[in-house]
Each structure stands twice: as structure tokens, then as C-alpha cells.
Amino acid sequence: MIRLYEKGERRVAVVEEARRWQEAGIITPEQAAAVAERYRPELVRVNVFIRILLALFTTVVVAALVALPAVMFNVKEDGFTVLCLIFAPLCAWVADHELIAGRRLYRCGAEEALLLLAVGMLALAVAIPAHHWGHSAERLAWLAAHVIILAGAVMLTVRYGYALAAFGAMLALAGLPFHLADVLLWQSPGLSRLVLLLLLGAAAIWAQLRLTGRNSLPRGYVWSLESMRLAAWTGIYLDVNLFAHRLLWREWLGWIPGEWQLPWSDPLCALLTAILPVAALAMGIGRRDRALLWFGVVSSILSIITLKYYIHFGHLAEELTAAGLLLAGLAFGLLRWLRAGSKRCRGAFTAEPLLEPRLYGLDAEALAAIQPLTPAANVPQAKGFQPGGGTFGGGGASGSY
């Protein structure tokens, strides 16, 4: 990641955690304001709505700038390729040098849109000229454009830590086996699905291993790795679960039901459809990972609905009602069991809501920022010997011994 983002994200994280502590009542508003002033980031930030508007505005402006010379000079496909080759590095240079390094924009939408447009125009510049080269050459050109999008999304993720680019890279990676099958004329659709499972599984394992050292990673990298892991889990689950909908596979991939498939594929897919949500819930609870917990909850609901295609116990409405009652009873029973424990907790689990920092590894730094701002206790000091407090009388000894 570029040094500007890596340094600024740390300050942004401390300020955000101080604000969360203020909302939880741990620190006072004055302390949170002092931390925000002390750790003020040198980056320009906007809210999510302005970010979306700036991204849309930038996309429209770039499209207009590309279309204007194309309309004025009546360029054809080769001329449009030249325009893409000109504007792709120009957009990347403006985003990196002028907006990020010069204006210090921090995920404001404009620089993100420019970088994504640069990758897209470079891919189009490779694919468009192959339109007149023949069917085989056109397939290879679009495969090369696919690889350029994948490589560009990976480069944006590595350099800038954009979670959106990481998600796009996972989408490109998921579509690569099917594009290869179309170019290389693979006759068995099961081979594409097997390659897809291997690629997504490797990506999920690599992202999980990298997330073990999340305390030393910048926040942008953590978001990117979480996006990769969640996208990989989702892709594996959909690849397994959509096996029941063979009509959809036939419509998308030209797969006719009854063609070659792995032995015992139906029971295996049904088993994985049930195991994946349970594994995600177990890992989410054990590691206190909110993303895995949400994935486990959503995939469990989808599994309850779609397991109807594998196992038939009755009508779908009856199965959903029974499953909902079972889950509600399980949640109620767990809460009662936790509240009945010593100090309303059992081990490391409790039924009470706790403040869990969303960003790991920042507690020490936030506490170090807040500690000098904490007012000292007003403790009265012990009084020592003070001269001039009494008088000595002359004459005889009048004191008592």
C-alpha cells in the first residue's frame, strides 16, 4: 500500500474508535474531541453518499471526454482503441499523482472511479481490435481482456487497499474457469466447476492465513482480505447450492441435464450445502468474526429453503415454519443458558452486549491517546512543619512535661 494511505488510515482508525468509545460512554466528548484534534488525518474524506455521487460524476465525465473526439472525428473501432490506449494511462496518472498524492483524497469516489476506468479501458483496447480477426482470435482477445481485468484489480488492491477492487478481482477469478472452458473447448462442464472450487478454496485459505496477522496490517488491507474471503465463501456456496438448479446451469453454460458429472454429486452437494453454513457459524463464534457470522446466518437461511430440492419432508411453508420455530427456540435457549451462569456469563461468552472494537489492535494506541487527556484526581497533600505557628514565653518554664 502507498505510504500516504498507510499512515493516514492509522489516524482515521484511532479517531473512529475514540468516537465509538464516546458513544458507549467510556470517555467524555471533550476527550474524544481532543483525540480527534490530536490525530487529525491529513486525508480528505467524504461520506458514502458523496462518494457515490463523485464516482458517478467522474464516470460520466470520462465517458463524455472519450466520446467527444470519437463523435467529432467519426472514429471507428481502431480509433476507439487508440482513444482507450490514450485515456487509460491518463486516468491512472490523474488519480494517483494529482488526486491521491496532490489533493490527498481518501476513498472519495473520484480517484477510485478513475482507476477502475483505466483498467476497463485497457481491457477494451485489447479486446475490440480482435472483432475482425476471426472467431478464435476474438475469443483469445476477450480472454486476454479478462486476464487484464483480473490483474488490474489485483494491482489496485495491492497498491491502494481498495475492498471494491478485491471484490472485483474475486468476480474475475470466479469467471475465469468458464472463460477458459469456452476458449479451450472443454467438453465436460464438471471440470470448470472443479477448477472453480479449487481456485476459490485456495483464495479463501490464503485470505484466512493473512488475516491471522491483521493487527499489523493497514485497515484497507484488512477490508480487502475480508472481502476476498467472504466472496470466496459465497462463490463456493453458490457453486455447490446451484447444482440443484440444473435448468439455470443449462441456460447459462449450455449444460444439458444428464451429461457427465461426478459420482454421488447430488448427495455431496446436499451435504456441503448443510456443512458450509455450520462451519462458518462455528468459525465466526470461535474467532468473533462478524463477517463469517453474517455469512453463516444468511447461508443457513438459504440452505433451509434450497435443501427442499434434495430432501423432501413436506411442503415448503411447513418446513420454513418448523425451521424458524427451531432457530428461535435455539436462540432463546442459548440466551437463558448464558444468563443462568455465574455473573451472567459462561466462559468467554455472555448474554450482555459488550463493546467490541471493530478494528483490531487499536486499543493500546487509543488508550495512549486518551490517557494524557484524563484529568488527574484532586488529592489533598499532607501538611508538613509550618514555622510561625506558635510563640515562646519568657521567664520560667511554664510548659508541662
Image (cartoon, helix red, strand yellow):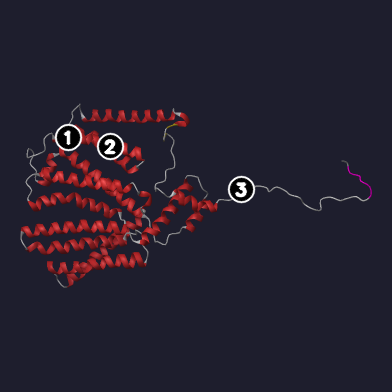
The quadrant of the image that shows the C terminus is top right
- Residue depicted at 31% across the width and 37% down the height: 281
Whether residue 28 appears in magenta in the rendering, the answer is no
Quick one: label 2, few (<14), some, or many (20+) residues within 10 Å?
Answer: some
Magenta residues, start to end: 395-399
With 384 as the anchor, is 164 left or right in this view? left
Identity, as a three-letter code, of the amino acid under mark 3:
Ala
Residue extending furthest bottom? 73
With 146 as the anchor, is 37 left or right in this view? right
Whether residue 396 appears in magenta in the rendering, the answer is yes
Mark 1 or mark 3: name the one nearer the start of the chain.
Answer: 1
SS at badge 3: loop
The numbered mark at residue 377 is: 3
Image location (x, y in percent) of residue 202: 22, 46
User: What is the C-alpha distance between the residues marked 3 and 2?
Assistant: 50 Å
- Residue depicted at 31% across the width and 30% down the height: 327
State the residue position of label 2: 279
Mark 1 or mark 2: name the one nearer the start of the chain.
Answer: 1
Q: Main secondary structure of the magenta part?
A: loop
